[in-house]
Amino acid sequence: MRILVTDGMDKSAIQTLIADGHEIVEQFYEPDQLGAALRDFNCVIVRSATKIRANHIDECKGSKLQLIIRAGVGVDNIDVKYAEANGIKVMNTPRASSDSVAELALAHMFSCCRFISAAGATMREGKWEKKAYGKGIEIAGKTLGIIGYGRIGQSLGRKAQALGMKVLAFDIFHIPGVECETMKYVDMDELLANSDFVSLHTPSIDGKPLINADTIAKMKDGAILINTSRGTNVDEAALLEALNSGKLRAAGLDVFSEEPCKNADLLNHPMVSATPHIGAQTAEAQKRIGAEIVDVIRNFCK
Ligand SMILES: NC(=O)c1ccc[n+]([C@@H]2O[C@H](COP(=O)([O-])OP(=O)(O)OC[C@H]3O[C@@H](n4cnc5c(N)ncnc54)[C@H](O)[C@@H]3O)[C@@H](O)[C@H]2O)c1
């Protein structure tokens, strides 16, 4: 196959695909050039930077494009139904990055507990604010509410229990056999009312925020919100208000309603720990994603 890789990919996976006899072109295309470019390829592999919309699919109708692979979990940057209605298969790599995203959620939890993001920033300005940042809290013994107990949610749940936390999970599906002394499924209101930390791990729910002024009001005073799922799952204006009023202690955010995030009030808030949508971007996850893509292509070519 002629394969276009638009947003980068693990080098050893590229070498394996070349050894399998495929031709690989690594090139990013601006949205206005993407549709025409796709006509020359059987397969395109994207991460999140490249968005494949209906107009791109229209532009390459009747060409040899057969397969779109999203190197990652969320396929919201691809018009999946439209692609499939036009005979183009869409695949992703759902398992490869679960531990990486779960570890980043944990990193934000620690950062929020101990002011790691804000304290580091002030030290770069030559300050030594031992008193201001000497009011940390521990994770052990606290309750973590996980909304969306799928692959990433469960990975985070296991790690949190190992750190001495209790886990409450809300999900529309319940997996038999995962509940135990330190993990219990509850409804959304019970989770919000009893969790010291709330971490989001659902897909985007029709672009509507799960966490808004109403749901924040149901949370414990001083709770910490973590979002590594999708930015649209949180109403950022309501979050900012809750941080300013002290209703919420802190927030750890990897994803934003608009990316790159331009919400300076949110990013500069001393109780916000922020990263630029890097949940899946570890060396290990990128290697696993590469290996999963090789499997997808080998199965497709069978
Ligand atoms: N920050 C990053 O870089 C990064 C990387 C990978 C994935 N993600 C995000 O994390 C999300 C979760 O990934 P995953 O691999 O765990 O997906 P998953 O499909 O394994 O799990 C999602 C879970 O959410 C549940 N769910 C769906 N709608 C719900 C609702 N309305 N209320 C409660 N639960 C609901 C599902 O039943 C499922 O158990 C992805 O959809 C993606 O948006 C972010």
Image: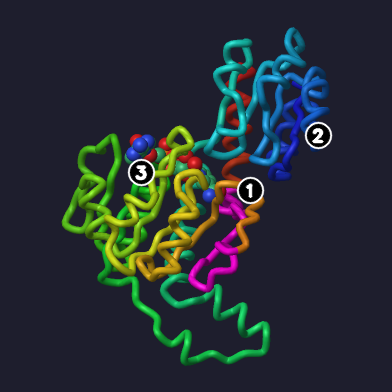
- Do tag 2 and tag 3 residues touch (Cβ < 8 Å)? no
In this view, 26 is above or below 298: below
Mark identifier at residue 29:
2
Q: Quadrant of the C terminus?
A: top right
In this view, 142 is above or below 75: below
- Which residue appears at 32% of the width and 50% of the height? 214
Indicate the amino acid at tag 1. Glu
Q: Which residue is mark 1?
A: 259
Mark 2 or mark 1, earlier in chain: 2
Rounded to the nearest angstrom, the CA distance separating label 2 from label 3 is 34 Å
**Picture coordinates of residue 53, whole percent (x, y):** 66, 25
Indicate the amino acid at tag 3. Gly
Is residue 269 rendered magenta in the image?
Answer: yes
State the residue in front, 35 or 5.
Answer: 35
Q: Quadrant of the N terminus?
A: top right
State the residue in front, 212 or 194.
Answer: 212
**Picture coordinates of residue 121, whole percent (x, y):** 62, 78
Q: Which residues are magenta?
A: 265-286
Q: Which residue is mark 3?
A: 148
Is residue 123 rendered magenta in the image?
Answer: no
**Picture coordinates of residue 32, whole percent (x, y):** 81, 28
In this view, 295 is above or below 231: above
Callout 2 crowding tier (Cα within 10 Å): few <14, some 14–19, many ≥20:
some
* Rendered image quadrant of residue 170: top left
Whether the residue under disc 3 has CB within 8 Å of ligand 1: yes
Indicate the amino acid at tag 2. Tyr
In this view, 258 is above or below 92: below
View quadrant of ligand 1: top left
Callout 1 crowding tier (Cα within 10 Å): few <14, some 14–19, many ≥20:
few
* Rendered image quadrant of residue 82: top right
Q: Is residue 200 left or right of residue 96?
A: left
The answer to whether residue 13 shows anywhere in this view is yes
